[in-house]
Image (tube, helix red, strand yellow):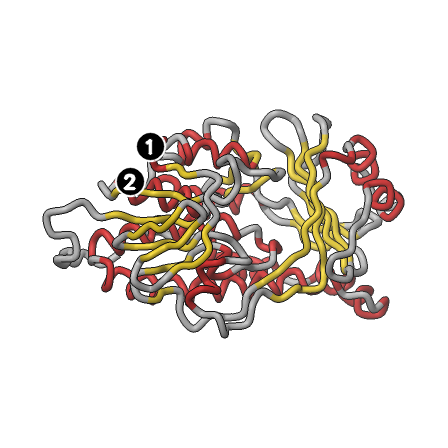
Amino acid sequence: MPATARNDDRGDSTMKVIIVGGGIGGLAAAVAFHQRGWQVEILERTPEFTEIGAGLSIQPNGLRALDTLGLGDPLRSGGLADPLAGIRCASGGWLIRNDIDDLKRRFGQWVTVHRAALVDLLRAAVPAQALRPGTEVRHVQPDGTVRHSGGTSTADLVVGADGVHSVTRHSLWPRIPGPRYVGYTAWRFIAPPQPVEGSVETWGRGERFGHVPMPDGRVYCYLLANAPIGSRTHLDQLRQRFAHWHGPIPTLLNTAGEEAVLQHDTYELPRLPTFVSGKVAILGDAAHAMTPNLGQGACQALEDAVTLAAAADTLGVRAGLEEYDRVRRPRTQMIARRSRQAGAPAHWTSPPLTALRDVALPILPNALFNRSITPAYTWTL
């Protein structure tokens, strides 16, 4: 962030920011602004500030964003993790094999946590009086006015961190196309403790399975498969579907409980022409919802949060929002594009194409993979 003196937006009074949405991106923004002396108000639709989810891999760039808030080391203390060891085919052969020691040496450390653990860490770093759960936002105006179920609030800056179906985004740009279903749905669950060979993803035809060991021995699992929008699949059907895939995939599914499996359709946003309007900025999925193929969704929201707070506090609201949009929009849209491209071959359904994929991937140089991930992992504020 340029070392430019802050303009006179602040004057002698404390600046106020309203944050719409109390997920990872919203809470990270709240921490960042609170640490800079801003008054913070967080409006969250659900009755509690928590995360109903499964595991989450925080990659080196996400950890660096948390380091700017003084929260990187507390997350690391819960247990470190390895990056993706590689990609296998359904029979077990390796399609891509990563040098995990080299990745850590070049880029830094990875951490795997439960999503709720990161939310709890962030929530504890903001004042309790800033939290307003059970508050549903209905409309956001460019002048910093927010209408919600509790009345009306105003602030010097409003941050829309309210997810892929963002009310903030729709309020400001009602004619912009909404989120697009990408053609596959995702299931996530945490399996009981059991040994697995690191973090591995397996590709079939139009479907894939990933497993990531967690520090306490449990295993975070995710599945993605081509499906019509809104379709629902039960655990028994998933067990049958993946019964003949290589181990430990069938075992992981057999040890999961039906109540532990979460299913969500996968959406992404079109490339927005701007992330800011008046005194309002959007971040995270509200601005650039992307496929989960690079595991960068939460990390990009963390980057957004600390970048926005630094820009607005250093440059003033108007110039700070311009700087935030200039810096964050090209980067996040680039990563969203690469994420879409990275996962596309896993969802091919043509037998000749998938056979060609399984022959070609093992002989491609690792440099191609490294070029695709380097821009994501090397971010600094």
Picture coordinates of residue 343, whole percent (x, y): 66, 60
Quadrant assignment, res 74:
top left
User: Image quadrant for the N terminus?
Assistant: bottom left
How far apart marks 2 and 1 lie (CA) works out to 8 Å
Is disc 2 surrounded by few (<14), some (14 to 19) or many (20+) residues within 10 Å?
many
Amino acid on which the number 2 mark rests in the picture = His
Q: Which mark is residue 151?
A: none
Kindly state the secondary structure of the residue where label 2 is placed: helix
Amino acid on which the number 1 mark rests in the picture = Pro
Which residue is found at the position 40% from the left and 36% from the top? 72
Is disc 1 surrounded by few (<14), some (14 to 19) or many (20+) residues within 10 Å?
some
Task: Read off the residue under disc 1.
Answer: 127
Q: Report the side of 100 relative to 262 (left or right).
A: left
Observer able to see residue 112: no
Picture coordinates of residue 98, whole percent (x, y): 62, 49
Tag 2 and tag 1, C-beta contact below 8 Å: yes
Mark 2 or mark 1: name the one nearer the start of the chain: 2
Q: Which mark is residue 34?
A: 2
Observer able to see residue 42: yes
Q: Determine the residue located farthest toward the front in the rendered image.
A: 151
Query: In this rendering, is residue 76 above or below 102?
Result: above
Q: Report the side of 249 relative to 71 (left or right).
A: right
Kindly state the secondary structure of the residue where label 1 is placed: loop
Picture coordinates of residue 139, whole percent (x, y): 43, 59
Q: Nearer the viewer, residue 313 or 230?
A: 230
Which residue is found at the position 46% from the left and 38% from the top? 133
Picture coordinates of residue 300, whole percent (x, y): 46, 53
